Image: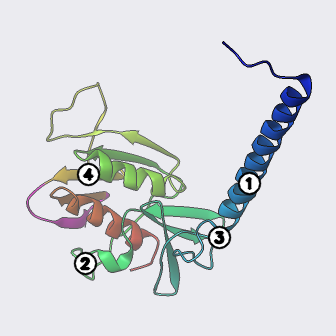
Amino acid sequence: MRKIISREEVEKKRKRNQLIVGIVLIGVMVFGTLGYAFQGLGEGKNDNGGDGKVVEYNRYSFTESGGYWSLGLGDLNFLFKYNPEQIERIGGDSGVVTKYSGKPLYIYSESDTAKMEILRNIQYFPQRIQNACPKNKVCEDNIPLKTCEDNFIIIEESESSVLKQEGNCTFISGNGEEVVKISDEFLFKILGIV
């Protein structure tokens, strides 16, 4: 059997419960605001507002953020998987001659990651970029056949690491993640960083 409770006691209990809930909500709001305000203190923030390290290389500042290295040049922002200190120089001192500005560029790639690395960063220069197939390969999807008379970047998976220019072709080849490093080296050469 239930105990009979007066209206005064019911009202007193309701007010007490409302006060407790109010205090808890105020505490959650205060601690949530403080937590948000102090979030990230002591972590690797840098002067550029990024969340990682900054690497200086040949007067260029690379900022790590979200697993990529960012480089701002004027109004353009470039993103690389690696910074210049993380790549090996396999292209030698000969450099890569580039004539991509304002002309069509064709690309063939056996590595989607390396292809995306190049497309993301070279997009500012050519008139347009189109997939193509080297004459010595068999390609699907009805893409055009191109030679080294066209501006052509050919990325191949290979056991040997190569970055070389023949005519208007740039050959990038390597194994696994190495081909991405070589692609970044190619981009650094185009931009005059290495």
User: Label 4 amino acid?
Assistant: Ile
In the rendered view, would you say 32 is above or below 163? above
User: Label 2 amino acid?
Assistant: Arg
- Closer-to-camera residue (22/11): 11
From the image, tell me which residue sits under label 2: 89
Query: Is 188 included in the stretch rendered in magenta?
Result: no
For this orientation, the residue located farthest to the top is: 1
Please give the range of residues in magenta.
158-168
Q: Nearer the viewer, mark 2 or mark 4?
A: 2
Q: Residue at x 66, y 12 (%)?
A: 1
From the image, tell me which residue sits under label 3: 74
Give the mark nearest the N terminus, 2 or 4: 2
User: Callout 2: helix, strand or loop?
Assistant: loop
- Closer-to-camera residue (93/41): 41
User: Callout 3: helix, strand or loop?
Assistant: loop
Q: Residue at x 47, y 60 (%)?
A: 66
Give the mark nearest the N terminus, 1 or 4: 1
From the image, tell me which residue sits under label 1: 27
From the image, tell me which residue sits under label 4: 154
User: Callout 4: helix, strand or loop?
Assistant: strand
Mark 3, residues whose alpha carbon is within 10 Å: few (<14), some, or many (≥20)? few
User: Label 1 amino acid?
Assistant: Gly
Q: Is residue 63 left or right of residue 152?
A: right
Q: Position of residue 174 (x, y in %)?
A: 17, 60
